[in-house]
Image (tube, rainbow, N blue to C red):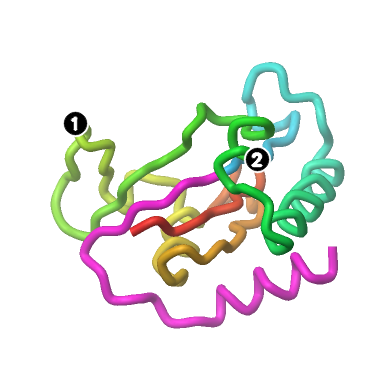
Amino acid sequence: METLRKDIKAVAARPERKADEIQVQHLLVAHKDAGIGGVTRTKEEAEQLTAELYEQIRNGADFDKLVKEHTDDAHPGIYGMTMKGAGDRGRNVYPRKGMVAAFGDVGWRLDVNEVGVAPFDPRTSPYGWHIIKRLK
């Protein structure tokens, strides 16, 4: 848990990377108060599971496999985000402001192939914890 919380703070302290568009894959670990059907874990259990999955990723686990096995969103959980315009839903690209705020806040601070976590926050990440890997 300590590593997870330390790394969340470290990524949040970075400046955003310069890019008009990025692509990320995420693994959502939701909690029962997020309004996602079938999720019964508490916020504390969700944070603990996030820490466990994040540690597996740090130790070389296959990110896509973990997404497939554990996400509370739909697999593959790949989204593009753009800083300019309305996006392109045909390419699954959304305007940054059209996504949960923490999703973009972390995504734009990561380097390609790097993983970070957007923690639960009622305003910026209300569904739970997002483990995010920047793909492009």
Q: Mark 2 points at which residue?
A: 66
**x, y percentage for residue 59?**
73, 62
- Is residue 127 something one can see in this rendering? no
In reply to whether residue 41 is colored magenta, the answer given is no
The quadrant in which residue 45 appears is top right
What is the C-alpha distance between the residues marked 2 and 1?
26 Å
Counting residues from the N terminus, which is met first, the one under dot 2 or under dot 1? 2
> The residue tagged with tag 2: helix, strand or loop?
helix
The quadrant in which residue 87 appears is top left
| Label 2 close to label 1 by CB (< 8 Å) | no
> The residue tagged with tag 1: helix, strand or loop?
helix
Q: Which residue lies furthest to the left in this view?
A: 85
Above or below for 22 versus 15: above
Is 35 positioned to the left or the right of 56 in the image?
A: left
Above or below for 28 versus 117: above
Of 135 and 84, the residue lying toward us: 135
Is 32 positioned to the left or the right of 20 in the image?
A: right
Residue at point 79%, 70% (across, down): 3
Q: Name the residue under label 1.
A: 90
Residue at point 51%, 30% (across, down): 75
| Residue type pointed to by label 2 | Leu
Is 21 positioned to the left or the right of 3 in the image?
A: left
